[in-house]
Image: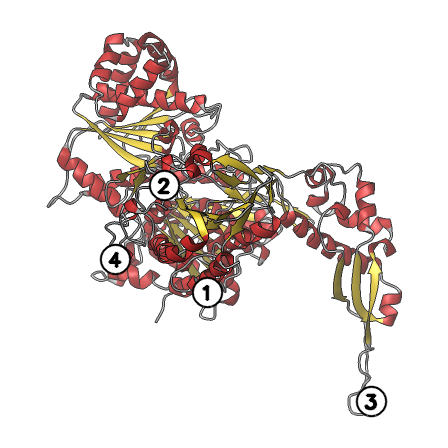
Amino acid sequence: MTTLKQDYDTLSKLGRLDKDIPDFISDNLNPAFKLREYQKEVIARFIDYLGNYPERIKPSQLLFYMATGSGKTLLMATNILYLFSKGYRNFLFFVNSINTIEKTRDNFLNPNSIKYLFNNKIKFEDKELKINEVENFEASNNDDINIIFSTIQGLHSYVNVSRENTLTYEDFKDKKIVIISDEAHHINTWTKNRLGKGESIAKITWEHTVNNIFNSNTENIMLEYTATVDLDNPAIYEKYQNKIIYEYSLRQFRQDGYSKEVKVLQADLNNIDRMLQAIILSQYRRKIAEKNKLHLKPVILFKSKTIKESEQNEEKFHRKIKDLKEGDIQKIKTQSKGSVLENVFDYFKKENVTFGNLITELMEDFLEEKCMLLDSNNIDEVKQVKLNALEDKNNEIRVIFAVDMLNEGWDVLNLFDIVRLYDIRDSKGNRPGKTTIAEAQLIGRGARYYPFKLKKEDDKFKRKFDQDPENDMKIVEELYYHSSHNPRYIQELKIALRDTGIMPPQEPKTIHLKVKEDIKKTNFWKNGFIFINKRVEADRSKIKDINDIEVSKNFGPYNLKTGFTQDRAIFTEEIKLEEDKVTRQFELKDFNDAILIKAISKLEFYKFDNLQKYFPKLESMNNFIESLKQIKLDIRSSKKKLKNLDPDDKLELCLNILMQIESQIKSGYTEYKGTKLFIHNKIREVVRSKILNINVGDYSDQEYGLPMSNPKYENLRLNISNKGWYVYNENYGTSEEKYFIQFINGAMEKLKKKYSEIYLLRNANLFKLYRFSDGQATEPDFVLFLKEKGKKKIIQFQLFIESKGTVWINKDQWKENFLKEIESKHELQILAENKEYRLIGMPFYNETVKKQEFSNAFDKIINT
C-alpha cells in the first residue's frame, strides 16, 4: 500500500498534477516573494488533496515536512488564501516558542515588515479583506481572515483551565477551523511515549488538547509544518505515514542551490582572537559585496554555553574593540596561513587596505550599540523586532551574543559567521551528542541563502558560484562556523551536518578542467567562432491597449439562466419543457459604458497605474475601455432573455471576461526576450580552463564527478584525453553526458568522411542561451562544431545539444522546444561571403527513451 506522499510523487512524475497556481493566491502574496518550483508543487498537491484525493479523511490532517529555510511560512500564507476561497475564516496558529509567535505576528499582520507575507491589499474578486488577530472566534469577522496566535503551552492552559475572556473548548464547537502548527514536532509528546504510557497520561499533554480541538468538527483541517520528524520512532511513523503530503529535505534544499555552503574554520586560539578572526572575515565579506554593488550587512553570532559566559564574552569583546591595535590584526594575519583568512589579507594588500584603515572601520562597525545581547534574561519586544529585521537597511546590528534562544524559529538571511565560544563534547561512541546535534541544527538555520543578483538573468535565491570557486563573490554564498581546534569535535559536527543534509557526504572534489594544448594550436581555436544570443529587455514602448498584445478576442459561450418558471398539476396537465435555448454573439460595445466602467472599478488589476505597467503607451482609461469594446462573447439563453439582458447579467458577464483577460495579460507579460540575432564570439575568448568543485556522491546519478577515463560503469569508459575532437582533457559529467560522448565517438568514422573539422565542447558554465519568447536562460550541455569538406563555400555547423536524465525530460521540456526553434528562427551576422554558418538545436539526448529520436535528427543533418 502506497503512502500519501508516494501517491503524489507518482502523480507529479506522470505529469497528472495541475500546477497552475490560482491568481487569487499569487496576486495576494507579497510581490517580493516569488514562488519557487518546489513551492508550486506543494500548493498543487494541497489543492488537489482537498478537492480530488479519493481517500481523503475528515477531519483532514496534513504534514509539510520541509527543510529549514525552504519557505514554510510563505506556504502557510498560500494555504490560508486557498482555504479562505473554500469558506474557511477562522485559523488557529500555534508554535512552541513565544519568540516565534512574535515573529509570525509580524509576518502576518505588519505590512511595514520586510517579511510581510501578503500584498498591500488582499482582494477576492471585487472585495477587499483584512487579516485580524482575535482572542477567540466569537469576535471573528466572517468577511475576513481571523487568526488566533498562541504557543502550544498557552493553548493547552487556556482550554483546560477556565478563565474569563480566554479560549475554551466551547469556542470550537459548531465552527469549522484550520489549525496551523509551526515546528509541529513539539506536539507529539504523547505519540512518542504512548507505547509505554497509559491514556490517563495522554489526557494532560498538549497533543491531547490539540486533538480534542481538531476532532470537534469533521470539516476541520490541521496543517503541520516542520523540518524535524522522528520517523524512526514507530509511533511517529504510524501517525504520519499517510499525512506527509510533501517532503523537501535539507539535503535536497542545498543540492538545489537554495542554501549557503557551510565551511568549518577551526583555530587553536583564545576566544577573543577567534572573535577578531570572525569580524575581519565579516568585514572582508562586506567589502567584496560593496565592490560588486551589493548592499550587504553581514551578521555574526557569538554563541556561549551559559548566560553568564555570554555576558562575559560581550564585555571582553567591547573592551577589545575599543582598544584595538595594529598588533592585534598582525597576530591574526600571522595565524591565517592555509585558511580563508589568508585570502582576506591578500585582498587587503591588493586593495591597499592598511591595518590602520581596517581598525577604524572595525571600531565604527562594531560599536556597542551595533551589538545585541540576547538570552532569557535579556529579551524584550524591541529586541525581538530588531532580530526579525536584521536584513533591513536601517538595522545596524552586526553582532548577536546568545546562548540557546535562537536554536529554533530564527529567520535570518544575512548571518554568515557563527562563533562557538566554548569547547565541550557530549558524544558517545564518536557519534554526535545532543549539544552537537543542536549546533548542527542552528547552522542549518544560518545557512539560509542571502538573495542577490549580479546579472539580470540571475536567480536571486540560488547559489551562483558553485562552478566558479575562485570568484571573490563565493564568500557571500558561504557560512563559516568558527570553532576551537578540536579534531574529534569537528569530526562529530561534520557527521551531524551530513546527517541533516546541510553539508555534502564527502569533502568537495577540486577538478582542474583544462583545454588541451593541441586544441590551442588549431585554426578552430585561433580563428573559430561560437554564436550566442543575448537577453534584452522586451520592447513594450509601443503597447497602448489590448489590440497590441496577444489576448483572446472571443469568449464563451456563456449559459445564462432563462428565468423559466412553470406551475402545473403533474397528473392533469401536460408539462411544458423549458423554452429552447439559442446562442447569440454580442460585443462589449453592446453593453453601455456604465456597465463596463462599473466592472472595471471592481477589479484591482484594472487600476490605471497598474495597467501602465503592461501598456506603457496607455494614455487614458477611456482609451483602454474603447479597446475592450471590440471583444466578442457568445451567450446562450432563451430568445426572450437575449433580447433584453438585464444590468446584473451584463455586469456578471463583463466581470467574467475581464478576469480572463487579466489572466492572459499577466501570463503573456514578460520583461525580457532572447534575441533572434546570434552574435559571433571568438572561441578562445569564451572557452577557458576552469577549476570546479564537485560534491562527488551527492547526487542520484553517481557518475557525476567521476572521470570518463575511470567511471563507475565500465561501458562508459573512454580515454578522451587522446581524442583530438574533444576540447577539454576530461569529462566528469553525468551518465547521460558520458553516453552522449560515446555516441559521438561511435559516429566519428561517419563524420570524418564529410567534415574536415569536428570539435565537441562541453559547456562548463561558459555561456547561456536565452529563449526567444521570454529570455529564460538555459545552458546546453554540449556544442558540436562541424566544418564541411571540399566545398567552395565553407559551410560550418554549430549544434546545441542537451543530454537529459529521464526524470528531467518532462520538467525541462521547454528547453527542448526552444532548442528546436533555433534552426528556423535564428539570424546571424554575415562574417564573410564565402562562409556559411548553420545553427541547429537538437532534441534531447537520452540513452533509453530519446536516443532514437536524437539519432534520426542527427543522421538527417549529416546526410543532408
Q: Nearer the viewer, residue 25 or 774?
A: 774
Query: Label 1 to label 4, Cα distance in Å?
Result: 29 Å
Q: Secondary structure at mark 2?
A: loop
Q: Which mark is residue 574?
A: 3
Find disc 4 in the rendering and name its residue.
713
Pick whichever of labels 3 and 2 is earlier in the sequence.
Answer: 2
Find disc 2 in the rendering and name its residue.
97
Query: Label 1 to label 3, Cα distance in Å?
Result: 53 Å
Q: Secondary structure at mark 3?
A: loop
Pick whichever of labels 1 and 4 is earlier in the sequence.
Answer: 1
Q: Nearer the viewer, residue 45 or 775?
A: 775
Query: Identity of the amino acid at label 4?
Result: Tyr
Find disc 1 in the rendering and name its residue.
14
Query: Label 4 to label 3, Cα distance in Å?
Result: 81 Å
Task: From the image, state whether disc 1 or disc 3 is nearer to you.
Answer: 1
Query: Label 1 to label 2, Cα distance in Å?
Result: 41 Å
Q: Position of residue 125 (x, y in %)?
A: 67, 51
Quarter of the image with the N terminus in it: bottom left
Q: Position of residue 244 (x, y in %)?
A: 38, 59
Q: Secondary structure at mark 4?
A: loop
Q: Residues within 10 Å of mark 3 (few under 14, many from 20)?
A: few
Whether the residues at callouts 1 and 2 have beta carbons within 8 Å, the answer is: no
